Amino acid sequence: MGTYTGFNTGRNYKFHKTPQHPLERIQQRKAASINNDNNVSAFDNIFETHPQSSEHYIRRRQTSINIDNNQNDQTLGNAIDTITENSESENAEKHIHKHLKDNILGTLKSKAGKLLDSTEVVKDSFNQQKYSRLANSSYDYFNSNGDADAVEKGLSDSDYSHLGLENYKVDKELSSIDNVVLHNKISGETHISFRGTTDDLKKQISF
Amino acid sequence: MFNPKAAENSKRFTEASEQTDKVVAKYGKRFTTVSGHSQGGGISSLIGQEKDIRGFHFNPAISAKQDAENSKGLYAKNIEKQVLYKTHMDIASPLSYTQPIRKKFNVNLVGTKPGIDNSIVKTHSLDNFAAKGGLNVERNTMVSSMKKASEQGFL
């Protein structure tokens, strides 16, 4: 026996010289199937009979898609193959559904979980970072009981040197414990930072 | 912790308003800006709109009254820009994203930063808006910000 290809290579195919409407072709094949004494269907004209039995027309492809990253698990395709070949026909469907459910749920948990925890590197706007640091000055002023040096030290923090806030100085005359007034002599900018409550509940008592 | 009651009725707002007038008298309004976070953001946004001073507001506790005033077009003639920054799932600034506010404020939604994201309170933190070392920052995506803020509870 030659290599099983799935196609009936020994058959003499008849090709139409002129284009034929698909429906017409189907009707012809159907008629051929009904009139054939050997009960050979149109399907048999095209596909080779499987060496094991006529029920094995379709060679099942093994999927290479790993449904679950867990290497100990079988691929879903292999699992279904195993079930259909070894289980009673009435139980096969039930087993397949169970495997589908397990694999799909597993995939959703592993893949979707990563998606839900994902981060991205974004470029903040300069103003967002600059004014959030200036807004923070009012917290520094309040927490240091009105120490202007503490505020200016915070603004001069080298970690935030890209924002260029080192020239802002506290205007003590106009500042209050809740709101700090900053002035930059070089740029001429003036800023008022209004303190909020707190983002640290441990500090809440002192507010 | 968060006090969403109308900031305009509070003693703090009255003081802030008087203080701002003194600042404007001394330095002028042209190069003056205001900012605030949380309740301070509520105050800064209101001062910014009432006095038409450019403002930057972080997770601000915008009051229902201010939202209504914007809905009525009270500050329609203002010239200075108001910019609002809000983290996803921030509970103190629900009125920062209403239609009247979005119409008058430049509203920016910001992802939380890893490490300052695992509770509702940390999601509200001002530390989410700045970053050490530069403008390029690793941030949680919108979905991730919301998931982390909600799964860890209040603290």
Image (cartoon, coloured by chain):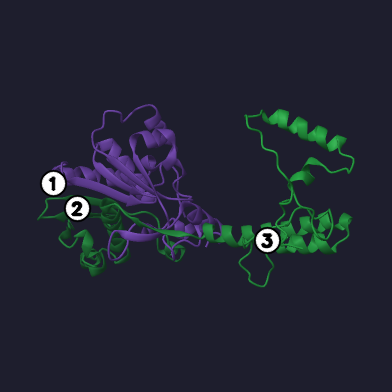
Q: Nearer the viewer, residue A43 or B134?
A: A43
- Tell me which corner region of the image, top left, top right, bottom left or bottom right, holds residue A43: top right
Neighbour tally class for label 1: few under 14, some 14-19, many 20 plus, Cα within 10 Å: some
- Colour given to chain A in the rendered image: green
From the image, state whether disc 3 or disc 2 is nearer to you: 3
User: Which quadrant of the figure has residue B106?
Assistant: top left
Q: Which mark is residue A174?
A: 2
**Observer able to see residue A21:** yes
Circle 3: residue type: Gln
Q: Position of residue B72 (x, y in %)?
A: 38, 26
Q: Are marks 3 and 2 on the same chain?
A: yes
Q: Is residue A123 left or right of residue B61?
A: left
Label 3 to label 2, Cα distance in Å?
A: 77 Å
Say which chain tag 2 marks. A
Q: Amino acid at mark 2?
A: Leu
> Looking at the image, is mark 3 or mark 2 earlier in the sequence?
3
Which quadrant, please, contains the C terminus of chain A?
Answer: bottom left
How far across and down, in percent of the image, does residue A162 sit? 22, 62
Cβ atoms under marks 3 and 1 closer than 8 Å? no
Q: CA distance from mark 2 to mark 1?
A: 11 Å
Left or right: residue A77 versus residue A159 is right
Chain B appears in which tint? purple
Residue indicated by mark 1 = B27
Q: Position of residue A71 (x, y in %)?
A: 63, 71
Q: Which residue is mark 3?
A: A62
Crowd tier of the residue under label 2, counting other residues whose Cα lies within 10 Å: few below 14, some 14–19, many 20 or above: some
Tell me which residue sits at (77%, 44%) in the image: A45
Give the left or right position of residue B133, taking residue B61 as reference: left
Q: Are marks 2 and 1 on the same chain?
A: no
> For the residue labelled by badge 3, is the local secondary structure a helix, a strand or a loop?
loop
